[in-house]
Structure formats: C-alpha cells, structure tokens
Image (spheres, grey):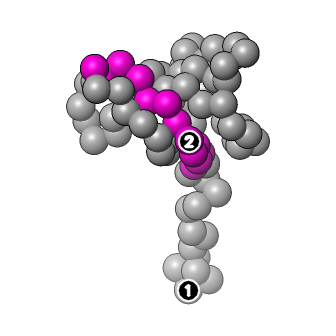
Amino acid sequence: MLDGTIERDADGVRFTIEDLTGKTETVNVLYSGQMPGTFEPGVDVVVIGKYASNGALITADQLQTKCPSKYEGSASPAAQQ
C-alpha cells in the first residue's frame, strides 16, 4: 500500500496499491470490512474482490496484511555457532 493514500469515509477505507512484480501501475482499493490490526502505510496487502473493467478500482471483499518480520524465520542454533 502506498504511503499517504489512506482515506476513511462512510463507505469504508480507500487506499492505493502498487504491483509488487516491478510494474509501475497502481490501482485504488475500497474496503469496508474489519481492518487488520497491522494495516498501516507501507505494509504489504493482499486484496480479493471485484476489479472494475476500467482498471480504476478494486472493491475488496477480503483484505489481508503481511508483516514481513512476523514471517521471517529465526536462524537455527547450528547456524549461530
């Protein structure tokens, strides 16, 4: 999710995401469900929903955040020696 793009209103939360595969395109997202506690600017998100045919908006039914440090494995004791 791009920093500075989060807006909250009566319809839900609107924000902009970019493609993590290196493409420069962005798309706006509207989500009105319960927000994950880790939702904040700069966090990676996965959204599932309806993509407008004009490519301007995803109306998300599901939103999931990923905190990279939470999913990083710790080094094994053998690797620390």
**Relative to residue 28, is residue 25 drawn left or right?**
left
Circle 1: is it few (<14), some (14-19), or many (20+) Cα within 10 Å? few
- Give the residue pinned by disc 1: 78
Q: How many marks?
A: 2
Q: Residue at x 52, y 36 (%)?
A: 60
| Front-lying residue, 39 or 72 | 39
Q: Position of residue 76 (x, y in %)?
A: 58, 80
Three-letter code for the amino acid on which mark 2 is drawn: Asp
Mark 2 vs mark 1, CA separation in Å = 44 Å
> What's the magenta bit mostly, secondary-structure-wise?
strand
Q: Residue at x 66, y 31 (%)?
A: 32
**Relative to residue 47, is residue 66 drawn left or right?**
right
2 drawn magenta: no
In the image, residue 54 sits, relative to residue 31, either above or below, namely above
Q: Earlier in the sequence, mark 2 or mark 1?
A: 2
Asked which secondary structure carries label 2, the reply is strand
- Give the residue pinned by disc 2: 61
In the image, residue 6 sits, relative to residue 79, either above or below, namely above
In the image, residue 29 sits, relative to residue 81, either above or below, namely above
Front: mark 2 or 1: 2
Asked which secondary structure carries label 1, the reply is loop
Pointers 2 and 1 in contact (CB under 8 A)? Answer: no
Residues shaded magenta: 54-66
Can see residue 45? no
Can see residue 42? yes
